[in-house]
Image: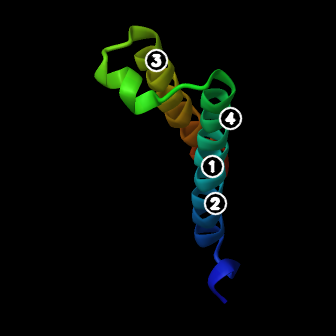
Amino acid sequence: MFFQHIMFTKMAMAIYGGIVAVFFMVVGFRFLAGMLALDISNELQEKNAAVGMAVMGMYIGIGVAIGIVVGLAIH
């Protein structure tokens, strides 16, 4: 079987955890944008620094979340 080897199990856990982390980040970001009634692409085109920092925070959060999930899956 594919998942009898521990390496494949950990790799599957890391991929699944990464997908779940990205999903929840996107859902949370869309929820925040919906609550504040923002058009994010329009605000970024107008060079709104606050929206740019929020998007930057989302990307940093995704990176940290995926790093933690992969690190825990490998450990």
Please state which of the two labelled residues, at mark 2 or mark 3, is closer to the viewer.
3
- Separation of residues labelled 3 and 4 (CA atoms): 14 Å
The answer to whether residue 59 is visible is yes
- Sequence-first disc among 1 and 4: 1
Q: State the image quarter where residue 4 is shown.
A: bottom right
Please name the residue that numbered disc 3 is placed on.
51
As rendered, which of 41 and 54 lies closer to the eye? 41
Please name the residue that numbered disc 1 is placed on.
23
User: Which residue is drawn at the image coordinates 59% and 67% (left, top)?
Assistant: 7
The answer to whether residue 75 is visible is no
The spot of residue 16 in percent (x, y) is 64, 60
The spot of residue 11 in percent (x, y) is 57, 63
Is disc 4 placed on a helix, strand or loop? helix
The amino acid beneath tag 1 is Phe
**In this picture, residue 42 sits left or right of residue 64:** left
User: Which residue is drawn at the image coordinates 67% and 43% (left, top)?
Assistant: 24
Marks 3 and 1: CB-CB under 8 Å? no
Please name the residue that numbered disc 2 is placed on.
16
User: Which residue is drawn at the image coordinates 52% and 29% (left, top)?
Assistant: 58
